[in-house]
Image: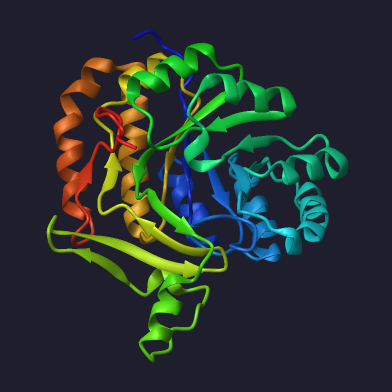
Amino acid sequence: MNEQKKPELLVTPKDLDAISVLSEAGADAFIIGEQRYGLRLAGEFTREQVKEATEIAHTLGKKIYVAMNALFHNDKIDELADYVRFLAETKVDAIVFGDPAVLMTVRSEAPQMKLHWNPETTATNWFTANYWGRKGAKRAVLARELSMDEIIEMKEEADVELEVQVHGATCMFQSKRTLIGNYMSFQGNNLAVERTDQHRGLMLADPERGVKYPIFEDENGTHILSPHDICIIDELEEMIEAKVDSFKIDGILKSTDYLVKITQLYREAIDLCVSKQSEYGKKKEEWLQLIEQIQPENRTIDTGFFFKETVY
């Protein structure tokens, strides 16, 4: 492989302290925010923390993207302009959105702000990605259900940057309803919805398949995550050759120590794949073994839908 531009290594940190250590580990950019506006963030960042995180990242030569990809109802629409103005004043590098209401607000309040289109499961073809590109998005965050071949085809046709998740948990189900709280209330128990709910360790058990699905509630409703973590550290060549722009490591439900180790391994893998592909090939099995050793209990790794058909 000829020397070429490396894809961005994007990580979702749990807190402010993680910004510096993950930068040192090799991360190029971070997605942060608060659950009032963003979906399934690894950690909660107040406005003051967003400011501080941006200052830290920019000092280190890194980028900060803020998530505004929640499902917005009428009650939050009037808040969007103030939050967008705050992010523009803070000089964050981009806003991640799924709802056109955010795009329209950015157009009026901060027209120079970069936008990353992330509608979760519906970013499945290059034509729609380019549509949102013409509306102002600079990047499309691809659905986790796409195969490697589909990703490569999208990159060939896309006029916008493409971001692909390469490691971590994925969301299998979301409902605006508080399903756990409703169930517990029906049973006569009390389970208050708090911002820390994703850290309670609640699982939806499937004895027939022998797997457990992490499940939590927050302001955006109920979320059920995959029983396994995506890991394609040994299959990056095609996407790097195709010039996919950003590789994302999702840190939800993971410790900072874990994320540091994973980031270091992907940093090494990307660098070797770009500059010394023969060395990359020799290290694949070692990286997989190292990741398997630090995986949380009951969280095995697999390749998601990269090499198998999605059955709807």
Q: Is residue 290 above or below residue 202?
A: above
Which residue is drawn at the image coordinates 37% and 48% (left, top)?
A: 170
Q: Quadrant of the C terminus?
A: top left
Image side of residue 156 versus residue 274, left or right: right
Q: Specify the farthest residue to the top.
A: 2
Which residue is drawn at the image coordinates 29% and 17% (left, top)?
A: 276
Residue 277 placement (x, y as % from top left): 27, 16
Image side of residue 230 versus residue 81, left or right: left
Q: Is residue 156 above or below residue 301?
A: above
Q: Specify the farthest residue to the bottom.
A: 188
Residue 46 placement (x, y as % from top left): 65, 66
Image side of residue 302 versus residue 261, left or right: left
Q: Nearer the viewer, residue 207 or 161?
A: 207
Q: Tag count in the figure?
A: 0
Which residue is drawn at the image coordinates 15% and 36% (left, top)?
A: 286
Quadrant assignment, res 116:
top right
Residue 236 placement (x, y as % from top left): 32, 25
Quadrant assignment, res 26:
top left
Q: Nearer the viewer, residue 79 or 206?
A: 206
> By what rule are the colours in the image chosen?
rainbow
Residue 208 placement (x, y as % from top left): 12, 59
Which residue is drawn at the image coordinates 45% and 53% (left, top)?
A: 21
Image side of residue 208 versus residue 71, left or right: left
Q: Is residue 186 above or below residue 173?
A: below
Q: Quadrant of the N terminus?
A: top left
Q: Is residue 123 above or below residue 119?
A: above
